[in-house]
């Protein structure tokens, strides 16, 4: 099966991810005790800054 | 003796309780109950306390009312009503699901890395721990 209805609750599957992406998801689940945290704007911004080697404080200064 | 809260302590009861707390100030329990198709807000209280289990056919509406991933809620509802044998099967089948929030995180990772499929390094682990204060 190559296409799934985007509204299906079965749409996203772990097997569709790359090995690295599975590691990200696994770590997120472990860290948050499977609480499924939302990627809020603040969190995503902090993450993006960190991934690019900067800190939000640097950007805001 | 009849147990009055047979589902207390289940992951679903904890999850709903936590989510309703998060929504406090934005949505009342009565609004959530109404959006989920319950006539009485007390139905939500019963789910929170574990006095009642969530019927599977309520999952889509309640997921929308709580603004949570329906797949996650469905899995929790299945686990709530299953025995240990069912739990193993449910974990094997539904544990493979990536939730809506996880998809959002993956989108952020892909976007921030220009689709370079970055590995999870010790530095990025520390970053994520920092974001969640862990």
Image (cartoon, coloured by chain):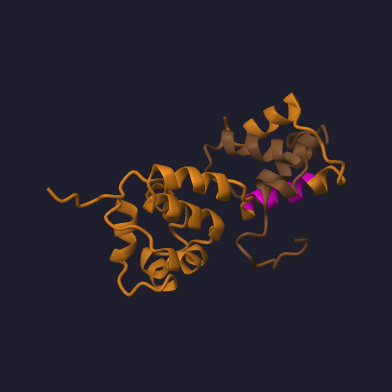
Chain colours: A brown, B orange
Residue at 60% over, 50% down: A38
In the image, A25: left or right of B17? right
The image position of residue B23, as x and y in percent, is 47, 57
In the image, B124: left or right of B80? right
The image position of residue B118, as x and y in percent, is 82, 36
Q: What stretch is highlighted in magenta?
A: B101-109
Q: Is the magenta stretch mostly helix, strand or loop?
A: helix
Q: Nearer the viewer, residue A32 or A23?
A: A23
Residue at 62% over, 38% down: A28
Q: Which residue lies furthest to the left in this view?
A: B1
Q: Which of B58 and A56 is in front in this view?
A: B58
Let me know if residue B69 appears in the view. Answer: no
Q: Which of A18 and B109 is in front in this view?
A: A18
User: How many numbered badges does the structure rendering display?
Assistant: 0
Let me know if residue A9 appears in the view. Answer: yes
In the image, A23: left or right of B49? right
Q: For residue B106: magenta?
A: yes
Residue at 73% over, 31% down: B124
Residue A48 to residue B134: above or below: below
The image position of residue B94, as x and y in percent, is 56, 50
Residue at 64% over, 37% down: A26
Q: Which of A60 and B23 is in front in this view?
A: B23
Residue B26 to residue B103: above or below: below
The image position of residue B9, as x and y in percent, is 34, 43
Q: For residue A39: magenta?
A: no
Q: Quarter of the image for the C terminus of chain B: give it.
A: top right
Residue A19 to residue A6: above or below: above
Residue B83 to residue B54: above or below: above
Quadrant hosting residue B71: bottom right
């Amino acid at each position: 099966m190559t296409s799934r209805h985007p509204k299906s609750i079965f749409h996203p599957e772990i097997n569709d991810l790359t090995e690295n992406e599975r590691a990200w998801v696994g770590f997120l689940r472990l860290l948050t005790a499977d609480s499924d945290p939302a990627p809020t704007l603040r969190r995503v911004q902090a993450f993006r800054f960190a991934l690019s080697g900067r800190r939000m404080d640097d950007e805001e200064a | 003796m009849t147990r009055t809260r047979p589902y207390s302590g289940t992951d679903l009861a904890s999850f709903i309780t936590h989510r309703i707390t998060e929504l406090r100030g934005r949505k009342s329990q009565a609004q959530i109950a109404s959006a989920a198709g319950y006539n009485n807000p007390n139905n939500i209280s019963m789910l929170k306390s574990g006095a009642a289990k969530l019927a599977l056919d309520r999952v889509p509406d309640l997921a929308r009312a709580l603004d949570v991933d329906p797949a996650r809620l469905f899995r929790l509802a299945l686990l709530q009503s299953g025995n240990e044998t069912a739990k193993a099967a449910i974990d094997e089948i539904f544990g493979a699901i990536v939730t809506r929030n996880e998809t959002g995180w993956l989108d952020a990772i892909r976007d921030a890395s220009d689709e370079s499929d970055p590995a999870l390094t010790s530095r990025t682990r520390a970053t994520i721990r920092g974001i969640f204060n862990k």
